[in-house]
Image (cartoon, grey):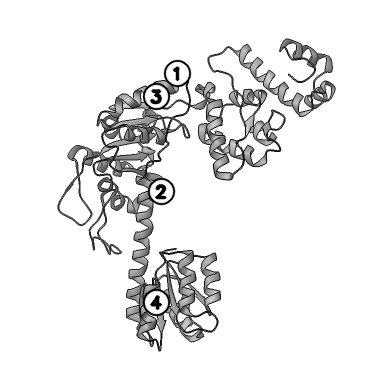
């Protein structure tokens, strides 16, 4: 979006001229011949900057400016006119116009204005992203009462009181980011920023600038000085989400900052002192990651002063009912309606599933159930078949084979019995089992012909 320009003018020659000028400079250009067309195009394809003529048939430039600003208050709009009055220019400025130029247009001046407007737009977007990254949600908490999650809570409370680096280990979706935020919230740095770095979302070419900052003119396009994430987190916590997504060369530079407690912006000879607490998450096995060359040994041993392992959901199935209750309330607030409820037989199936994506996968499933449900409760028969078929049932890994198989068979039979309204003959046919054999199975599981 920050390379897209919308040119609005009722004169075709001016539109063609400006389109050629800016496309030669590498910009993407959209054109509109009226205010109405401009509003429609902008709604479908938001632009980083708008060049807008004042006098046009239909809605004029000032009304178009007002409508564009109602859709995006931050979009920079450069007004153009061949016979505007001072009063018109003042009105346009008051309505939020970025600048005002008179026709005939100067190509050099327009290029400078658009470059500055797009740079301002880019910085506004980046600042908004950084604000979102530094805000810690008020209600972050680890849901559950299992021994595994209680152990994590206890460790977080102990470690939060120190400034020691922390390495959080665990599979995708186990709540590593939540644990990092809790460490921050319970620390002496709680009132300072919490800045998260998504290493995979930053191009390698921009990594140094994003982490350590740069001075104006340090490289082409550096029109302003910019603080990096380390400076943004001054006095607070810097969280690297998935450390192994950070290139080994960048890992070495991060290690140097930890050792020297200072960063050096690109283009500056002077180091900037930083006081931060660093937390990193890693979903891969660190030993394997080091052998594969995607995790440096020196940064691993520097960060691994304290490690916190987040348990997978299959390791704490007793927490699933509490998690589902919380997730159902969350979805009801987001999507409206009453929270979805699962019957005991449906809950038993959910507790027996592997949940390879952990809480993240469970959240998606609860959301799907909220959208697709037919009534207030979801029984095993109401559960979306494609999801139930895709979920991998798994008993406690510490159980013996017989108990694990029995738990799966019971859940499997309950699902198909409910699906067939407890018609034993139809269920037997559905699952390819003799009716007499199904009777024996029901008896062994303490299930009678009729709803249980």
Question: x and y percent of residue 275 in the render?
Answer: 21, 40
- In this figure, which residue is indicated by the disc labeled 3? 152
Q: Give the labeled residue for mark 2.
A: 201
Above or below 144: residue 399: above
Q: Earlier in the sequence, mark 3 or mark 4?
A: 4
Q: Nearer the viewer, residue 83 or 355?
A: 83
Q: Position of residue 242 (x, y in %)?
A: 39, 38
Q: Examine the image and state in which quarter residue 119 appears.
A: bottom left
State left or right for residue 270 relative to residue 431: left
| Cα separation between marks 3 and 4 | 57 Å
Q: Is residue 203 in view?
A: no
Position above or below: 175 against 118: above
**Alpha carbon distance from label 2 to label 3:** 28 Å
**Which numbered tag is attached to residue 92?**
4
Residue at the image point whose x is 73% and y is 10% from the top: 444
* In this view, the mark in front (1 or 2): 1
Instruction: Residue at 32%, 74% (x, y): give it.
Output: 112
């Amino acid at each position: 979006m920050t390379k897209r320009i919308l040119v609005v003018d009722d004169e075709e020659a001016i539109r063609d001229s400006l389109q050629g000028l800016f496309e030669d400079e590498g910009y993407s250009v959209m054109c509109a011949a009226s205010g109405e067309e401009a509003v429609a195009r902008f709604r479908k394809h938001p632009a980083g900057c708008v060049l807008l003529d004042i006098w046009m048939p239909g809605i004029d430039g000032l009304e178009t400016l007002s409508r564009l600003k109602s859709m995006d208050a931050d979009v920079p709009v450069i007004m153009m006119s061949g016979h505007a009055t001072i009063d018109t220019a003042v009105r346009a400025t008051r309505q939020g116009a970025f600048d005002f130029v008179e026709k005939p247009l100067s190509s050099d001046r327009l290029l400078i204005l658009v470059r500055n407007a797009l740079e301002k737009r880019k910085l506004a977007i980046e600042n908004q992203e950084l604000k979102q990254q530094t805000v810690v949600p008020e209600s972050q908490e680890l849901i559950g009462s299992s021994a595994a999650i209680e152990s994590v809570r206890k460790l977080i409370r102990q470690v939060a009181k120190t400034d020691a680096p922390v390495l959080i280990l665990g599979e995708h979706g186990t709540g590593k980011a939540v644990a990092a935020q809790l460490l921050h919230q319970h620390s002496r740095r709680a009132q300072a920023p919490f800045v998260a770095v998504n290493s995979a979302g930053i191009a390698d070419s921009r990594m140094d600038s994003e982490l350590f900052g740069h001075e104006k003119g340090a490289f082409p396009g550096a029109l302003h000085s910019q603080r990096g994430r380390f400076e943004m987190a001054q006095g607070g916590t810097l969280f690297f989400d998935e450390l192994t997504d950070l290139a080994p060369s960048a890992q070495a530079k991060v290690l140097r900052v930890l050792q020297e407690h200072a960063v050096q912006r690109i283009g500056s000879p002077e180091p900037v002192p930083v006081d931060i607490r660093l937390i990193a998450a890693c979903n891969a096995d660190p030993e394997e990651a080091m052998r594969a060359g995607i995790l440096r040994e020196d940064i691993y041993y520097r960060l691994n002063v304290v490690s916190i392992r987040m348990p997978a959901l299959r390791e704490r199935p007793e927490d699933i009912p509490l998690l589902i209750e919380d997730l159902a309330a969350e979805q009801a607030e987001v999507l409206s309606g009453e929270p979805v409820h699962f019957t005991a037989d449906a809950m038993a199936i959910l507790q027996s599933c592997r949940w390879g994506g952990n809480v993240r996968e469970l959240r998606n499933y609860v959301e799907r159930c909220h959208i697709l449900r037919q009534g207030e409760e979801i029984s095993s028969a109401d559960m979306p078949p494609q999801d139930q078929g895709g979920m991998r049932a798994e008993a406690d890994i510490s159980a013996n084979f017989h108990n694990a198989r029995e738990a799966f068979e019971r859940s499997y039979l309950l699902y198909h019995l409910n699906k067939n309204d407890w018609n034993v003959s139809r269920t037997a046919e559905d699952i390819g089992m003799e009716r007499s054999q199904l009777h024996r199975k029901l008896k062994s599981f303490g299930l009678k012909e009729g709803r249980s």
